[in-house]
Image (tube, rainbow, N blue to C red):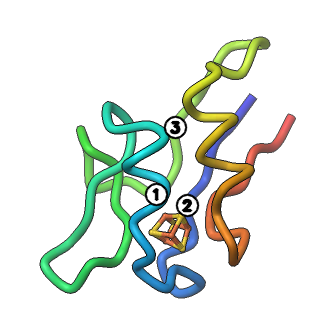
Amino acid sequence: MLCKIIPKKCIACGLCQIKAPNIFDYHDNGIVKLSDSDETEFQIGTDVPEDLLNAYKACPTRAIVIEK
Ligand code: SF4
């Protein structure tokens, strides 16, 4: 499975880093980035990690996408 972030949809609310601090970080302007890379997507296994799932559910603008 694949997780994507869509920075242009992000409203810098900060929820995703609260839910998944090891995955999400922010640019200086508060817009989401991945904590360990400047890419906008990363592969995940067949089981979505709970912290990622919680961040996905919390994002109010669907700036975090999980795809098969
Ligand atoms: S939860 Fe969504 S809108 Fe809020 S900072 Fe994270 S990606 Fe941006």
Q: Which residue is mark 3?
A: 42
Q: For mark 3, does the 10 Å Cα neighbourhood hold few (<14), some (14 to 19), or many (20 or more) residues?
A: few
Q: Is residue 65 above or below residue 28?
A: above
Q: Quadrant of the C terminus?
A: top right
Q: Is residue 33 above or below residue 1?
A: below
Left or right, 28 with respect to 68, comes to: left
Q: For mark 1, does the 10 Å Cα neighbourhood hold few (<14), some (14 to 19), or many (20 or more) residues?
A: some
Instruction: Return the residue nearer the eye: 5 or 22.
Output: 22
Q: Is residue 56 above or below residue 47?
A: below
Amino acid on which disc 3 is placed = Phe
Determine which of the numbered discs, if any, sits on residue 32 in the image.
none
At 44% from the left and 37% from the top, the residue drawn is 20
Which of the two labelled residues, at mark 3 and mark 2, occupies the earlier sequence position?
2
What whole-number distance in Å separates the C-alpha atoms at marks 1 and 3? 7 Å
Q: Quadrant of residue 22?
A: top left
The residue at label 2 has a CB less than 8 Å from ligand 1? yes
* SS category of the residue bearing label 3: strand
Q: Which residue is mark 2?
A: 5
Q: Which residue is mark 1?
A: 40
Q: Quadrant of residue 25?
A: bottom left
> Whole-percent x and y of residue 53?
69, 35
The answer to the question of whether label 1 and label 3 lie on touching residues, with beta carbons closer than 8 A, is no
* SS category of the residue bearing label 1: loop
What whole-number distance in Å separates the C-alpha atoms at marks 1 and 2? 5 Å
> Whole-percent x and y of residue 11?
49, 85
Left or right, 48 with respect to 36, comes to: right
